[in-house]
Image: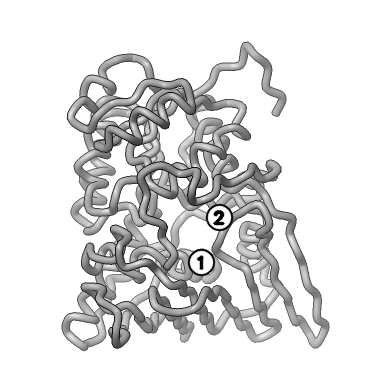
């Protein structure tokens, strides 16, 4: 799509300017030519002053968010607060009739997800959960190949996703809903749901706490998901290990091994190797600007009146499983899930291939506690 100076642009406010906003979203905006950064909202005066000067935009305090929503100066909000605050700040945005790009997980309960969806219905804006990989070429290609039956009947999925999280970061002391399952487990969970095109019907989970670490949750968790038609999935996530990310998918005709498969950055391109009927092939996708791509896609949906694919329903489907995993950890018992129809799928026309932007170094970001230890 060719953009000109006269093309309408969606005006965004960033609510919550922690590491993900400063490292990825705000720089990535430069690639989304149908979008513009127009305001930011933070409770930190230092962030407000310095980031407002850096980007040449006004800064608001959280207490002044209602004023911003009424101002007519923005069309959409990118919400990247801690997970437990998504409903508090997301519902007013949607009730005001504005559009919301909401970081994952969507919320910390099914009830909160439903409240956000109902607020969208009342307000009439668009709601997209920020599954950036739904616009990433390697991920969407792999989902499409599963839909096309390249690997035959899909039988099993396994994944490991871990990193060494700094305990001083806000993720280190926010309970289960700030821990590795909602934060990192959302990636393999969303991947397997889309690759299988099915929803899990039962959840098993067990966790452990690493000696010498002081998180207030299980920092390493193993999850088993049972699907209909005999499909099984397993993933392990950790806040206390060396960086690792991979997934394996097995069908009765072929298999897939992918790494990297979840992360982003100027040098990270999703790569996977298939073995089909005994023939092996590796596909290495070039790095793309994942945040700029999802911004462009969401703004394009707004400008043309389309509902984004990773919508509130997609976010709720993950959260209902995350909530079941929490119950399984608390009780030590498997948790049943009601059968529901398959979700919408990520389609090839969602793929965005903008060149990556430069990420700021940690010392260039303002008022953050670095995520990695």
- Residue 353 is situated, as x and y percent measured from the top left of the image, at 69, 45
Residue 286: quadrant of the picture:
bottom right
Left or right of 193 on screen, residue 274: right
User: Residue at point 70% right, 84% down?
Assistant: 253
The quarter in which the C terminus is drawn is bottom left
Mark 2 surroundings within 10 Å by alpha-carbon count, few (fewer than 14), some (14 through 19), many (20 or more): many
> In the image, 188: left or right of 239?
right
Residue 146, given in percent of the width and then of the height, sits at: 63, 68
Side (left or right) of 56 relative to 273: left
Give the camera-side residue of 196 and 58. Answer: 58
x 39%, y 78%: residue: 240
Numbered disc total: 2
Residue 191: mark:
1
Per the image, the residue denoted by label 2 is 133
Image quarter hosting the N terminus: top right
What residue do we see at 44% from left, 24% from top?
Answer: 53
């Amino acid at each position: 799509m060719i953009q000109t100076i006269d093309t309408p642009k969606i005006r965004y406010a960033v609510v919550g300017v922690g590491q993900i906003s400063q490292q990825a979203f705000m720089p990535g905006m430069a690639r989304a030519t149908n979008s513009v950064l127009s305001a930011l909202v933070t409770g930190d005066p230092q962030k407000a002053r310095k980031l407002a000067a850096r980007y040449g935009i006004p800064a608001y305090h959280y207490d002044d968010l209602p004023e911003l929503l009424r101002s007519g100066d923005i069309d959409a909000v990118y919400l990247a607060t801690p997970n437990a605050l998504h409903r508090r700040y997301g519902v007013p945005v949607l009730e005001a009739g504005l559009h919301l790009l909401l970081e994952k997980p969507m919320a910390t309960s099914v009830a909160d997800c439903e409240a956000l969806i109902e607020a969208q219905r009342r307000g009439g804006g668009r709601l997209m959960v920020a599954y950036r990989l739904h616009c990433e070429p390697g991920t969407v290609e792999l989902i499409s190949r599963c839909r096309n039956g390249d690997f035959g009947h899909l039988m099993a999925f396994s994944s490991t996703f871990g990193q060494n999280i700094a305990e001083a970061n806000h993720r280190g002391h926010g309970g289960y809903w700030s821990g590795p399952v909602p934060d990192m487990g959302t990636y393999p969970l969303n991947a397997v749901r889309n690759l299988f095109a099915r929803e899990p019907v039962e959840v098993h989970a067990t966790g452990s706490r690493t000696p010498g670490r002081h998180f207030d949750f299980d920092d390493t968790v193993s999850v088993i998901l049972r699907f209909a038609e005999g499909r099984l999935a397993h993933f392990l996530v950790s806040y206390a290990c060396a960086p690792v990310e991979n997934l394996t998918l097995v069908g009765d005709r072929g298999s897939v091994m992918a790494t990297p498969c979840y992360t982003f950055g100027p040098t990270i391109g999703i790569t996977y190797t298939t073995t089909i009927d005994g023939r092996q092939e590796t596909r290495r996708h070039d790095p793309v600007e994942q945040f700029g791509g999802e911004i462009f896609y969401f703004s394009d949906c707004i400008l043309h009146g389309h509902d984004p694919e990773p919508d509130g329903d997609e976010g709720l489907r993950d959260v209902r499983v995350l909530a079941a995993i929490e119950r399984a950890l608390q009780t030590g018992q498997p948790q049943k899930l009601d059968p529901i129809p398959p979700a919408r799928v990520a389609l090839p026309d969602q793929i965005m291939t903008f060149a990556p932007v430069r990420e700021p170094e940690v010392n260039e970001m303002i008022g953050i506690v670095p995520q990695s230890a």
